Amino acid sequence: MQTEAHPLEAFFHQAVRNSYEGRLGLNDPGVTGYVSRLLCEFTRLDKLYELRDALGRPVAELDRMMNAADPVFGQAPSFDAERRVRKHIGDYALFVAGMYPDSHAQRRSQRASYAELVHAGKESYYIVSQFNLFEYEVEAPLFARLSDWFERCILGLALVREELGNRRPMLPPPVQ
């Protein structure tokens, strides 16, 4: 059964492709496709703020996200849960650092710096890439490339933001 494409997928794919391939020389259809689908997914606030605490409130603070990903000292009940949360942290960090770099630092609830956000995103994608067996084997190399090229991917998203004419947008608040 084929899933229906997001209505903005072709638009975002072209914008990401123009920036990544056309302006940065980052010719990787897998990365381009992943980032364009990420933009589509994060048009929904419930996806951007997907992580929830025990009371069902959205988790938007990086330190709380990192705690939610830790299967040893934190809240992740399994290594599969760690992978899922780490993937979300990587996605969130890439999206916010590329599309809303000023918003992250301006939010009062955020204590992490931009550099910490970038580090957490890059590290999270690396950890996801290390889940390279069984059902995760096929996509593990994609996450390794996203980790290796994390800063370039952020720059590519900044170029997308520039192309869209959105110079200083504010990150929307979490949905309760």
Image (cartoon, grey):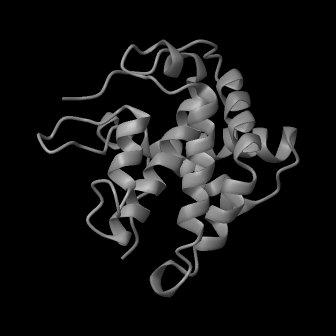
175 w.r.t. 7: above or below: above
**Point 26% across, 65% down: residue:** 77
- Within the image, what quadrant is residue 64 found in? top left
- The quadrant of the picture occupied by the N terminus is bottom left
In this view, the residue in front, 102 or 14, is 102
Give the side of residue 125 with respect to residue 150, left or right: left
The residue located at (56%, 79%) in the rendering is 132
Counting from the top left corner in percent of width and height, residue 39 is at 52, 41
**Image side of residue 167 versus residue 58, left or right:** right
Vertical order, 46 against 102 (above or below): below
The part of the image, by quadrant, that contains residue 73 is bottom left
Q: Quadrant of the C terminus?
A: top left
Q: What residue do we see at 31% from left, 70% from top?
A: 78
Q: Seen in the image, is 91 located left or right of residue 55?
A: right
Q: Is residue 12 above or below residue 142?
A: above
Query: What percent of the width, then of the height, locates residue 119?
Result: 62, 42
Seen from the viewer's position, the closer of residues 17 and 119 is 119
